[in-house]
Image (tube, rainbow, N blue to C red):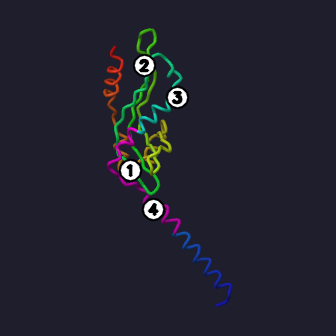
């Protein structure tokens, strides 16, 4: 065999190995493992939302942001921990002795934590046509149907508001 032929064989071999590596990484199981004993991450996520409240009305009299949630699971992979939740928020304040229902939302959120439980970011789904696709990108497959069909119960938030503003 001549040197050119050997070079071609090595080149083809390299391309085949590279192709196999790429294909294996594309189909590599990027799943997360659900874990127990980390429920404090839910509370950390709620506190993060409250501490980072950017509502322009937060300086109003008796302003308060209420946050309730349903947890769908805490998971981890090699790099991060994740808190999958449905979050309901609403803010209120008092104006002329009347309670003002300011603003809020009800949606699934995905919080990303470092391995030492520091919040790195949180993700929200897209609105409209992109909603279903974004849910499938944000959450493990085992949670897709649950989240896509979830009916949030806002009664817990209402109870907290009534208790806080009972006077």
Residue 38 in the magenta stretch? The answer is: yes
Q: Quadrant of residue 153?
A: top left
Q: Judge by depth and name the residue closer to the eye, 143 or 120.
A: 120
On screen, 38 above or below 18? above
**Where on the picture, by quarter, is residue 3?**
bottom right
As measured in the structure, the alpha-carbon distance from the residue carrying label 1 to the one carrying label 3 is: 28 Å
The residue segment tinted magenta is 21-43
Would you call the spot at circle 2 few (<14 residues within 10 Å), some (14-19), or many (20 or more)? few
Location of mark 3 (residue): 54
Q: Real-space Cα distance between discs 2 and 4? A: 47 Å
Who comes first in sequence, dot 2 or dot 4?
Answer: 4
Residue bearing mark 2:
101
- Look at the numbered discs 4 and 3 and tell me whether their residues touch, using CB distance below 8 Å: no
Q: Which residue is denoted by mark 4 in the rendering?
A: 28
| Residue denoted by label 1 | 75
Determine the CA span between mark 1 and mark 4.
Answer: 18 Å
């Amino acid at each position: 065999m001549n040197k050119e032929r050997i070079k071609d064989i090595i080149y083809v071999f390299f391309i085949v190995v590279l192709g196999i590596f790429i294909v294996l990484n594309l189909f590599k199981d990027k799943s997360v493992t659900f874990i127990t004993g980390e429920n404090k991450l839910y509370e950390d996520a709620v506190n993060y939302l409250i501490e980072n409240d950017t509502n322009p009305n937060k300086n109003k009299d008796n302003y308060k942001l209420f946050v309730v949630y349903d947890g769908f699971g805490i998971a981890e992979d090699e790099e991060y921990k994740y808190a999958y939740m449905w979050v309901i928020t609403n803010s209120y304040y008092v104006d002329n002795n009347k309670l003002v229902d300011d603003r809020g939302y009800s949606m699934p959120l995905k919080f990303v934590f470092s391995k030492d439980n520091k919040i790195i970011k949180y993700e929200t789904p897209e609105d409209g046509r992109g909603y279903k696709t974004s849910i499938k990108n944000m959450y493990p497959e085992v949670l897709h149907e649950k989240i896509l069909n979830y009916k949030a119960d806002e009664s817990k938030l209402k109870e907290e508001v009534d208790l806080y503003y009972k006077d």
